Image (cartoon, rainbow, N blue to C red):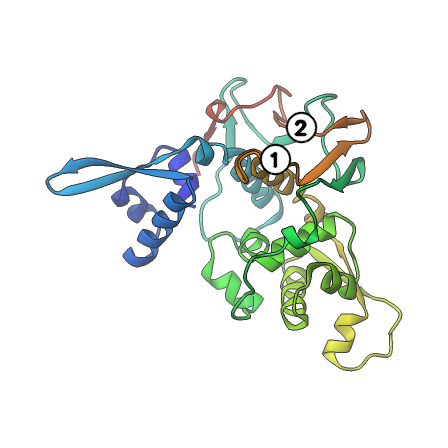
Amino acid sequence: MLLRLCLTGRRRYSEFQEELPISHAVLSARLDQLVGAGLLARREYSSRPPRSEYVLTPKGRATWPILAMIWGWERAWVEDHRYPTPPIRHETCGREVTLLLTCSHCGAQLRRTDLDARWGRAGGWEESVPPTRTRRRSSSRETREISFYPDTVAIFGNGWSSAIVGAAFLGVRRFTDFQRLLGVPPGSLSDRLHILVDHGVLHHASSEDLTATSAAAKDKSREYTLTEKGEAFLPVVLTTVSWAERWVGEGEEEVLHLTHLPCGKSLRPTVTCGSCHAPVRGRDITIGEA
C-alpha cells in the first residue's frame, strides 16, 4: 500500500498517515523497512523542525508492473474490498483498461500452459523458500480481517504461501511433494494450503487414500491444483520474477529461465493495454476515480 501511494505521488509521512489507518509505530517501521530494502530513499525537506519525505528509488519505481497486475487481479477476482479499487486509465488511448501481460517477442498474452520453466544456475527449490520459518499460524478468517487486500496478502503476505503458489505454477500438486521439495513443516504446509483453498486460489481433491479419517491424513492424501482464479494470478508471479531477476541479487546468475513455447524465445514479459494493445509504461497510466 505504501509503494502504491508513492507511485501515485505521495511522499510525506502525513500523507501516508492520512491515507492509511495504521499506527505511528507500524507506519514508521514499514517506511524504515522499505528504505532498508532500497525501495525508498529518505530525504530531509525541513531542518527546523527536522522532517523527511520518502522518494521512490529506481528499484522501488520498477515495482509498478507488479502492483498494476495485483490491481487488475483484485478488480477481476475479488468482490469484497476494504479499500477502493478504481479502474486504471491508459492515458495514451484515453480509455479505462485492463492491463495484460504479453510476450515481448510475439505479442501473445501469457498463459501458464504456454511456458516452460527451468531453474537457472542460481536457482533451485532451496532458494525459493523463506529464510526463516513462520513463527505463528494464522487462520484465513484472521487474514481477511486485518488486510486491505486479503486474497493477495494470502499469497504474498507469507513466505511459505508464496513458495507454495510458485511451486503450484511449476506443476507441484501433492502434499508430500510440496513438503519434500520446499522443506516446509507439515503443520505450516497444512495451514497455508487450507488458507489458499479458502481464498479460492487452490482446489484440493483426494488422491489414493480416500479412507483417511484424521485431518492430517486427509491433507496428505490430497492433490492441490490452481483454480481459474489462481491461474489468473500468473501475471503477478511473472512480473515479480522479472523484477527480482533485475533488481535482487545484483548481477547474480539467472534463477529461473522461462521460455515462451509458442514463439520459442526466452520470456520477456511486457505490460500491454487491453484496449489499444500498445506497450504500457508506468507514467502512461493513472488511477481513475472510485
Give the number of the disc on residue 118.
Answer: none
Give the number of the disc on residue 242.
Answer: 1
Q: Amino acid at mark 1?
A: Ser
* First in residue order: circle 1 vs circle 2: 1
Pick the residue in front: 73 or 132. Answer: 132
| Residue assigned mark 2 | 268
Task: Please name the residue shown 44% across and 39% down the image.
Answer: 290
Task: Please name the residue shown 42% across and 39% down the image.
Answer: 39
Find the distance from the CA under tag 1 to the CA under tag 2: 8 Å
Residue 245 in the image, given as x and y percentages of width and height? 60, 36
Q: Is residue 262 left or right of residue 278?
A: right
Res 129 → quadrant: bottom right
How dense is the environment of label 2, judged by Cα within 10 Å: few (below 14), some, or many (20 and up)?
Answer: some
Q: Is residue 288 visible?
A: no
Residue 71 in the image, given as x and y percentages of width and height? 54, 40
How dense is the environment of label 1, judged by Cα within 10 Å: few (below 14), some, or many (20 and up)?
Answer: some
Rendered view: 239 above or below 163: above
